Image: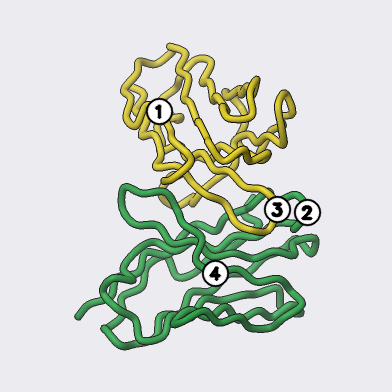
Chain colours: A green, B yellow
Amino acid sequence: QQQVKQSPQSLIVQKGGISIINCAYENTAFDYFPWYQQFPGKGPALLIAIRPDVSEKKEGRFTISFNKSAKQFSLHIMDSQPGDSATYFCAASPYSTDKLIFGTGTRLQVFP
Amino acid sequence: DAGITQSPRHKVTETGTPVTLRCHQTENHRYMYWYRQDPGHGLRLIHYSYGVKDTDKGEVSDGYSVSRSKTEDFLLTLESATSSQTSVYFCAISDPPGLGYTFGSGTRLTVV
């Protein structure tokens, strides 16, 4: 079962543009929503995370927007750079269990 | 990745043979997880552990077993490898919940 749906599957953005990746979840017990970044040949690494008591969280060029009523959250990458080219995964879990369910991933390519 | 190592990094095995993958951590984290990564499926949880001798099944546990006799080691065993188990396997650790996972570098397993 796909409890976390992620789109798009791939994304091509010009350097300096905004990259947007969307996720939707079904389980209302989820209350922890991280994003992971993965480079080829490496394990995923935590990028940024949010809990549902806030609607937005920003860290540098990366922002999570969260819509609890719609059960959706998204990652915005401002001023996208070629070094941001990677695969991005959204995930969700009940905070207490820390047992993450991942989306299917988005391959981002940023061209100079 | 610092504090977590997976072995082997690559393995080719024949259908029907047993295979054991090892995850070793030096962070003294309680929580450990095994995921498999496949194109179009993202990361799917196989088994997880909340402590020594405390393990449970994830969403894709059929054909896999785990053991955790020491805090630092979490072993994943494919009892009789099949071609459908060809994948990249990632181990992750966390403690306490909500601070994100640290992933290992992965094991690429090919079953021929």
**Residue B8 lies in what quarter of the image?**
top left
Crowd band around label 2 with a 10 angstrom C-alpha radius: few (<14), some (14–19), many (20+): few
Marks 1 and 3, how far apart at CA: 25 Å
Q: Is residue A112 visible?
A: yes
Q: Is the residue A54 above or below the residue B29 in the image?
A: below
Marks 4 and 3, how far apart at CA: 15 Å
Where's residue B55, x and y in %? Answer: 71, 29
Disc with the residue nearer the chain's start (1 vs 3): 1
Q: What kind of element bears circle 4?
A: strand
What chain letter is assigned to the residue under label 2? A
Disc with the residue nearer the chain's start (2 vs 4): 4
Query: Which quadrant of the rendered structure holds the C terminus of chain B?
Result: top left
The three-letter amino acid code for the residue at tag 3 is Pro
Residue receiving disc 4: A48
Q: Is the residue B10 above or below the residue A111 in the image?
A: above
Q: Are marks 1 and 4 in contact (CB under 8 Å)?
A: no
Q: Is residue B31 left or right of residue B91?
A: right
Q: What kind of element bears circle 3?
A: loop
The three-letter amino acid code for the residue at tag 1 is Ser
Residue receiving disc 2: A96
Residue receiving disc 3: B97
Crowd band around label 4 with a 10 angstrom C-alpha radius: few (<14), some (14–19), many (20+): some
What chain letter is assigned to the residue under label 4? A
Q: What kind of element bears circle 1?
A: strand
Q: What kind of element bears circle 2?
A: loop
The three-letter amino acid code for the residue at tag 4 is Ile
Marks 1 and 4, how far apart at CA: 28 Å
Residue receiving disc 1: B7
For residue A43, the mark is none
Q: Is residue B107 left or right of residue A14?
A: right
